[in-house]
């Protein structure tokens, strides 16, 4: 096993060809990252040319991070200049990589540390420790604190040692990554759709502080859910000053643990004036973890949940219904008013966000500025998603907003225009529908390909995994649930999503977006084979098959090929098993090919693959 510090930075992939840096990409949304090659070249610790002996192709993956000392220096300089301070080193690193001026990037003092590999051609390394040594010899920085361990006891000891050592480091860490040392064993275990099976992250317990609860604000989210937010006496937690923290929901307020480390210690309600324990979930999001009941003042007052929406005064609906008679069972209360101004604001910010439509320039401040004009003589109409794509008609009014110069307007309108081509998955994710997050939106777009086919699908077709064998066969799905496409929806959530997609307001919005030039299909290359609305299931040699890709292909990168095959109805897996239908083997195929041959699984070479795809070799 190999244990390595988990640096709290920004994931970056560096690609070297013939020893020269040719590309640097961020992780992005997990499918497509940002090209930050210009910024990466300005980071002193990233070599532009590798030492002699570099392989033909070397893709190293690691973290870009901002040392704590540099973070403090930059914030001192920004404060002196009257600029907004960075919230934490990770955000500062992410913002720096987006800079277009290499001189600014160089001045910030970012660092890079490699922790893994992507594509490699011509580098002999049979284990992670060998890779680390070879990469270090080529001039790429790696963590000097990585430890090769024999067995679980040595690994636990390394984790315990680092728990103390991390406090004196000049960069933020939140745990250790433990992985199998042998690449052969890593390949044998393979990957899930989200993570490798051969590595796990150990997270250290979150830092906890006590502070006093002063009051509670009631915030309305994009789905109408009202969330209680604690306002507390400021306290420094995990490197930042915290004054606000989530209280989750009103049911949880009545069930706060007296000792967050001991669930059997009893529970009580959280009251105004209490001394509360505050932590950061994932060392990022502050939340109230419990109550120090011994410090409760006599004047402490119970928290009163709102009965009407704080933004529009509409009656709130408690979920589940049992929560009306037993408040401890309550999980949420929602405003169902579609005209609620608070929901509009949150929905617009969400729609324009990076993981949704990624509209550069349309952040919270800009949305707030535009919404403030509603009902005034200088109104900029922004009452729904479609209005975003009409903002170019109001350039003069935009120019009247505070700090909205011509260049900023140009960038905003260019960002809006670019977002039109994001595709169906991003649009679905951006709508903020209940039960449709990023993963489900991608799965629906992958399965149906076009909005037309998605809207033509029945509620049953939205949830193939939960169908009975008989019903699945009648609808054209595989008998085995494991071989059916996974849309992320089940028996309870599919009806709600189907109803939301076919609501009159949603259908009208789709028509508006289409007329405004917004792409409502999956982008070319990721779309399933052409289908009619009454037959939204893919057909062809890949449809319904579980496929594994191994070795190096001349025509395709593995991720690109996986996306193409999934668009044609296949499920791409990282490991070979008895449920695998097909193995695509490129050059230097290893243990996966041997296992497929042992199991009698069909194997295609690249020439056969290209023929089936209708491409010339």
Image (tube, rainbow, N blue to C red):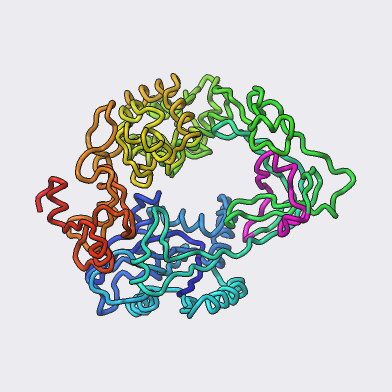
Instruction: Using the image as rendered, state which of residue 465 and residue 311 is in the foreground.
Output: 465
Give percent across and percent down for residue 469.
37, 38
Q: Nearer the viewer, residue 22 or 300?
A: 300
Residue 405 appears anywhere in the view: no
Farthest residue in the right direction? 298
Q: Which residues are magenta?
A: 238-265
Residue 614 location (% of width, % of height): 13, 45
Relative to residue 609, is residue 329 depicted above or below?
Answer: above
Is residue 420 part of the magenta span, yes or no? no
The residue sitting at the left extreme is: 616
Residue situated in front as seen by the camera: 505 or 91: 505
Seen in the image, is 298 located left or right of residue 183? right
Assign the C terminus to one quadrant of the image.
bottom left
Q: Position of residue 447 (x, y in %)?
A: 33, 38
Quarter occupied by residue 586: bottom left
Q: Residue at x 47, y 66 (%)?
A: 109
Numbered circles on residues, count: 0
Q: Quadrant of the N terminus?
A: bottom left
**Where is residue 607 drawn, in percent x and y?**
12, 56
385 left or right of 569? right
Left or right: where 67 falls relative to 516: right
Please check the rendered image and state whether residue 261 is part of the magenta-colored stretch, yes or no: yes
* Vertical placement of residue 289 versus 399, above or below: below
Is any atom of residue 515 visible in this view? Answer: yes
Q: Residue at x 44, y 64 (%)?
A: 63
Q: Residue at x 77, y 49 (%)?
A: 267
Residue 238: quadrant of the picture: bottom right
């Amino acid at each position: 096993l190999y244990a390595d510090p988990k640096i709290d930075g920004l994931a970056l992939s560096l690609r070297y060809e013939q020893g020269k840096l040719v590309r640097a990409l961020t992780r992005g949304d997990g499918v497509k990252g940002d090209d930050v090659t210009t910024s990466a070249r300005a980071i002193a610790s990233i070599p532009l040319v590798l030492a002699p002996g570099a392989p033909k192709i070397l893709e190293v993956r690691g973290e870009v991070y901002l040392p704590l000392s540099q973070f403090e220096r930059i914030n001192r300089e920004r404060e002196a200049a009257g600029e907004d301070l960075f919230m934490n080193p990770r955000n500062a690193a992410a913002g720096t990589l987006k800079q277009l001026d290499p001189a600014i990037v160089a001045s910030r003092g970012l660092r890079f540390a490699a922790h893994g590999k992507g594509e490699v051609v011509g580098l002999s390394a049979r284990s992670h420790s060998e890779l680390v040594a070879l990469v270090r010899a080529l001039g790429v920085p790696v963590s000097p604190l990585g430890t090769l361990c024999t067995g679980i006891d040595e690994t636990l000891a390394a984790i315990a040692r680092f728990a103390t050592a991390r406090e004196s480091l000049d960069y933020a860490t939140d745990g250790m990554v433990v992985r199998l040392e042998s690449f052969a064993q890593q390949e044998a275990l393979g990957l899930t759709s989200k993570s490798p099976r051969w590595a796990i992250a150990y997270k250290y317990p979150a830092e906890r502080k006590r502070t006093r609860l002063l009051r509670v604000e009631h915030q309305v989210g994009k789905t109408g859910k009202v969330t209680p937010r604690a306002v507390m006496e400021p306290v420094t937690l995990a490197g930042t000053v915290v004054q606000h923290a989530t209280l989750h929901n009103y049911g949880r307020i009545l069930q706060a643990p007296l000792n967050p480390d001991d669930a059997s210690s009893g529970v009580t309600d959280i009251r105004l004036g209490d001394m509360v324990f505050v932590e950061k979930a994932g060392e990022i999001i502050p939340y109230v973890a419990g109550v120090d009941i011994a410090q409760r003042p006599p004047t402490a007052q119970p928290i009163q949940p709102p009965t009407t929406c704080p933004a529009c005064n509409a009656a709130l609906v408690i979920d589940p219904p049992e929560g009306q008679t037993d408040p401890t069972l309550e999980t949420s209360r929602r405003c169902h008013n579609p005209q609620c101004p608070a929901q509009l604001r949150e929905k617009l910010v969400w729609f324009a966000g990076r993981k949704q439509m990624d509209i550069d320039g349309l952040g919270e401040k800009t949305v707030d500025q535009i919404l403030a004009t509603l009902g005034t003589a200088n109104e900029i109409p922004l009452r729904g998603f479609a209005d975003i794509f009409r903002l170019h008609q109001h350039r003069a009014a935009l120019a009247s907003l505070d700090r909205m110069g011509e260049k900023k307007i140009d960038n905003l309108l260019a960002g809006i225009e670019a977002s039109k081509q994001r595709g169906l998955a991003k649009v679905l994710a951006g709508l903020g529908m209940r039960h449709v997050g990023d993963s489900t939106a991608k799965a629906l777009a992958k399965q149906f390909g076009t909005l037309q086919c998605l809207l033509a699908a029945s509620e049953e077709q939205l949830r193939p995994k939960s169908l009975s064998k008989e019903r699945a066969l009648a609808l054209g799905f595989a008998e085995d649930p494991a071989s059916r496409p996974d849309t992320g929806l089940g028996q309870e959530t599919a009806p709600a999503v189907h109803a939301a997609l076919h609501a009159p307001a949603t259908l009208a919005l789709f028509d508006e977006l289409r007329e405004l030039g917004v792409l409502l299909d999956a982008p070319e290359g990721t779309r399933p084979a052409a289908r009619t609305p009454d037959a939204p299931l893919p057909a062809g040699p890949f449809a319904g098959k579980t496929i594994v890709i191994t070795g190096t292909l001349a025509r395709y990168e593995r991720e690109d090929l996986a996306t193409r095959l999934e668009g044609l109805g296949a499920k791409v897996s990282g490991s070979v098993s008895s449920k695998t239908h097909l193995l695509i083997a490129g050059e230097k195929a290893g243990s996966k090919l041997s296992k497929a041959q042992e199991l009698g699984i069909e194997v295609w070479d690249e020439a056969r693959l290209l023929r089936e795809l209708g491409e010339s070799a």
